[in-house]
């Protein structure tokens, strides 16, 4: 009896050890231009319902002070995948086109490369928008028989299906691996959208005829098929990995959708749903596709140990004001500004995490700051990995929040990006300091008392201004936010750093 009891005890211990160290499957769902007010569980006044996103809120954690690292697309995607601010790279302003060197440099750790090196299957399905090297130089010189280089398959992903960039950047086709399924051999331009204030990308298309004018487009490409095709491919890929996941080899899926970014083009079957016009219908359609992913996880028996992160690359596009006027729906969540803005509406976005097996006391809201840039350190923490000094320099693990433990974020940096406004802001706890620039004064806000940023209190709080200025300067010149060996930014001083001179920057960087 003693021997049998000992054996049982050892087996029980081993099973518990295995359970506690079982790596979760991970899915990151990334929408495009979705505001903090576009999740019905978080906005009592929402004019449409998002039941599947609401499930993530009710069964996980809603980070109500969650931030993208920029207020536009490319920089936020770089930060999410690398745990490093994009302004440390050569891209100081704006976004990238479809065809150029990838912003993620060779050898730079990404979510995918880190997880792949630690036993994960990895896939990216959707919109990339970080640059890729496409053969040829414009429609006249393309050779679609040659493989695309410097793209997701070179950044840690085993599988890729998607589009190179936003649909208004052209080179539109269904790319799988390094090739277009059907080459973009035709040309088109933006067409009138009868349902929204933007445009459509849909047939009829024109023959190329040696022209360089217009978007390069495949004859089978239609803008309103993106969400369906992306979800179908994601589901097909997950199905091939379920058996391995149950045997201890998990999967990681990065699923960046193209909605609700322009063109707002919900499928006809969604017409009339909700009370917010085509925009609301587009988000209802997006929510349905997320529901398809969640159903697959449940039906496949891997839901319990799959960690889902849902968030958006920046706040809502400028048409948010039309929705307020026409439908009484505020996509910004009552925050100031929207896409491209340094104010909260530009980068405070939906940020939801669900993991049935790994979250203590689900159904919580967490109101302190956290960033998408923190995913790299968080996933590393979950799988028991320590990041090297030259990876995830600005990434801090929020794994303690999932365990319902205390957590305090180091200062977060955000920036405006557009309309001649390229200011930086630093947020620590409730305090947010927006640095001055040409035509813009220094601004300080207490976000706890004034989340809509209505009253600039910089003049009344010189000590706080000084303290935050010193902290943002250190973050910029040391090449990192977190503790560790100082790292170099990819360039030297640049003109948007209005609060520090080039001489001061160079001197501080040497230390």
Image (cartoon, helix red, strand yellow):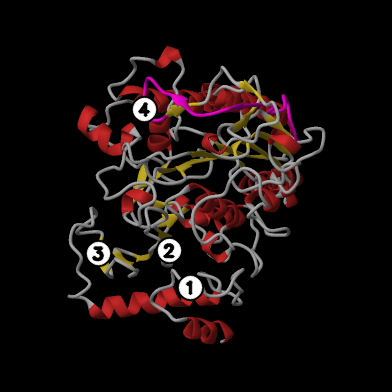
For the residues labelled 1 and 3, the Cα–Cα distance comes to 20 Å
Q: Are marks 2 and 1 in contact (CB under 8 Å)?
A: yes
Q: Earlier in the sequence, mark 3 or mark 2?
A: 2
Above or below for 371 versus 445: above
Classify residue 471 as left or right of residue 459.
right
Judging by the rendered image, the residue that carries numbered circle 2 is 413
CB contact under 8 Å: marks 3 and 2: no
Question: What secondary structure is marked by label 1?
Answer: helix
In the image, residue 235 above or below residue 324: above
Question: Which one is in front in this view, the residue at disc 2 or the one at disc 4?
Answer: 4
The disc at residue 445 is 3
Task: Identify the magenta region.
Answer: 178-198
The answer to which of marks 4 and 1 sits earlier in the sequence is 4
Report how far apart the C-alphas of labels 3 and 2 lie in the structure. 15 Å
180 part of magenta stretch = yes
Question: Is residue 300 rendered magenta in the image?
Answer: no
**Residue 73 percent across, percent down from the top left:** 49, 47
Which residue lies at the image location 73% right of the left edge and 26% below the top edge? 181
Residue farthest to the right, as pictured: 145
**Helix, strand or loop: magenta stretch:** loop
Q: Residue at x 59, y 32 (%)?
A: 215
Viewer-side label of 4, 3:
4
Of labels 2 and 4, earlier in sequence is: 4
Q: Which residue in the structure is indicated by mark 4?
A: 279
241 displayed left or right of 412: right
Q: Which residue is mark 1?
A: 475
The first of marks 1 and 3 along the sequence is: 3
Which residue of the protein is positioned furthest toward the front in this rendering?
A: 210
């Amino acid at each position: 009896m003693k021997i049998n009891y000992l054996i049982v005890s050892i087996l029980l211990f081993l099973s518990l050890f295995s359970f506690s160290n079982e790596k979760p499957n991970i899915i990151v769902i990334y929408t495009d231009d979705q505001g903090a007010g576009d999740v019905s569980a978080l906005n009592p006044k929402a004019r449409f319902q998002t039941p599947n996103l609401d499930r993530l809120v009710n069964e996980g954690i809603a980070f109500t002070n969650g931030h993208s690292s920029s207020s536009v697309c490319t920089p936020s995607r770089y930060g999410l995948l690398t745990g490093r601010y994009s302004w440390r790279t050569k891209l100081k302003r704006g976004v990238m086109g479809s065809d150029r060197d990838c912003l993620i440099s060779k050898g730079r750790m990404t979510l995918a490369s880190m997880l792949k090196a630690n036993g994960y299957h990895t896939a990216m399905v959707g919109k990339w928008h970080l640059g890729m090297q496409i053969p040829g130089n414009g429609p006249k010189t393309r050779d679609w028989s040659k493989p695309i280089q410097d793209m997701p398959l070179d950044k840690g992903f085993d599988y890729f299906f998607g589009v190179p960039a936003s649909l208004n950047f052209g080179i539109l086709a269904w790319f799988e691996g390094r090739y277009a399924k059907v080459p973009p051999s035709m040309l088109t331009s933006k067409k009138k959208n009868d349902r929204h204030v933007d445009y459509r990308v849909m047939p009829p298309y024109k023959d190329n005829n040696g022209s360089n004018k217009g978007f390069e487009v495949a004859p089978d490409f239609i803008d309103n098929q993106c969400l369906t095709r992306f979800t179908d491919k994601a589901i097909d890929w997950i199905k091939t990995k379920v058996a391995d996941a149950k045997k201890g080899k998990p999967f990681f899926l990065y699923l960046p959708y193209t909605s609700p970014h322009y063109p707002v083009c919900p499928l006809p079957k969604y017409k009339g749903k909700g009370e917010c016009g085509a925009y609301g219908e587009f988000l209802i359609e997006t929510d349905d596709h997320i529901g398809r992913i969640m159903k697959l996880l449940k039906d496949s028996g891997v839901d319990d140990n799959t960690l889902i992160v849902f968030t958006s690359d920046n706040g809502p596009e400028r048409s948010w004001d039309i929705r307020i006027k026409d439908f009484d729906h505020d996509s910004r969540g009552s925050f100031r500004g929207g896409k491209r803005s340094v104010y909260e509406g530009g980068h405070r976005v939906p940020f939801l995490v669900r993991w049935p097996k790994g979250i203590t006391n689900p159904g919580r809201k967490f109101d302190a700051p956290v960033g998408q840039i923190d995913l790299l350190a968080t996933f590393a923490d979950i799988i028991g990995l320590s990041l090297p000094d030259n990876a995830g320099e600005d990434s801090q693990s929020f794994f303690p929040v999932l365990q319902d433990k205390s957590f305090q974020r180091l200062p977060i940096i955000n920036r405006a990006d557009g309309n001649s406004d390229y200011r930086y802001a630093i947020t620590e706890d409730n305090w947010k300091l927006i640095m001055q620039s040409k035509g813009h004064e220094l601004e300080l806000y207490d976000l706890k008392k004034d989340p809509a940023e209505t009253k600039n209190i910089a003049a009344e709080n010189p000590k706080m201004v000084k303290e935050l200025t010193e902290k943002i300067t250190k973050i910029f010149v040391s090449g990192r936010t977190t503790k560790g060996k100082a790292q170099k930014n990819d360039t030297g001083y640049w003109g948007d750093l209005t609060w520090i001179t080039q001489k001061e920057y160079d001197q501080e960087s040497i230390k």
